[in-house]
Image: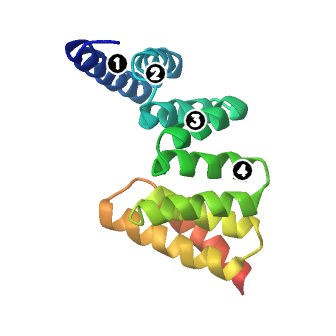
């Protein structure tokens, strides 16, 4: 069994690698980011955030099977990991499973109702499911949230909102 000092060192090292992974990700170096996350996970496999972050990177690379496995692993460690619920929703939505996506986005929303990306994704899932009025309502929420936070996705939400309002007529 590792000593207290060894556990603290491992946690610190894992967190530093995680920060390095996020920095690599921000520089569009997904491969480098995933390598850093692999090391973080090796050092601290119980950290749900590491698994969820790597899952999102896999998702963005189109590796949905790997992404889903990481999101599910994150939730086994911590059911309240918002990014894991959100990520499973993204995978389901891309796979055409709008009802499953809505369940996952709803879980993410209940955990963090102020997260604009979740509101936006919820709108897209409602649209895919054929719920035009719900899609408009959720996209309006996303737009308002992006506007309030100065998020760059505000323009995307506005474009989708225009289209969704036309569909809802």
Earlier in the chain: of badge 1 and badge 4, it is 1
Earlier in the chain: of badge 1 and badge 3, it is 1
Earlier in the chain: of badge 2 and badge 4, it is 2
Mark 1 and mark 2: Cα distance apart in space = 9 Å
Residue position for label 2: 41
Q: Nearer the viewer, mark 2 or mark 4?
A: 2
Residue position for label 3: 73
Earlier in the chain: of badge 1 and badge 2, it is 1
Element assignment for label 4:
helix
Q: From the image, which quarter does the C terminus lie in? A: bottom right
Mark 1 and mark 4: Cα distance apart in space = 29 Å
Crowd around label 1: few <14 · some 14–19 · many ≥20 (10 Å): many
Earlier in the chain: of badge 4 and badge 3, it is 3
Residue position for label 1: 17
Q: Residue at x 76, y 68 (%)?
A: 129
Q: Nearer the viewer, mark 1 or mark 2?
A: 2
Verify CB contact (< 8 Å) between mark 4 and mark 3. no
Q: Position of residue 57 (x, y in %)?
A: 55, 31
Q: Nearer the viewer, mark 4 or mark 3?
A: 3
The label on residue 92 is 4
């Amino acid at each position: 069994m590792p000593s207290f000092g060894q556990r603290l060192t491992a946690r610190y090292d894992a967190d530093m690698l995680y920060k390095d992974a996020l920095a690599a990700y921000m520089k569009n170096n997904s491969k480098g980011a995933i390598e850093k996350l692999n090391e973080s996970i090796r050092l601290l496999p119980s950290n749900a955030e590491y698994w969820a972050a790597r899952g999102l990177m896999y998702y963005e690379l189109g590796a949905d099977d790997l992404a889903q496995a990481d999101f599910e692993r994150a939730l086994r460690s911590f059911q309240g990991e918002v990014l894991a619920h959100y990520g499973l929703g993204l995978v389901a939505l891309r796979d055409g499973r709008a009802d499953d996506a809505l369940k996952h986005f709803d879980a993410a929303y209940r955990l963090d109702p102020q997260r604009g990306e979740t509101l936006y994704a919820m709108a897209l899932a409602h649209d895919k499911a054929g719920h035009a009025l719900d899609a408009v309502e959720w996209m309006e929420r996303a737009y308002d949230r992006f506007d309030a936070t100065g998020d760059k996705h505000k323009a995307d939400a506005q474009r989708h909102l225009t289209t969704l309002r036309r569909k809802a007529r």
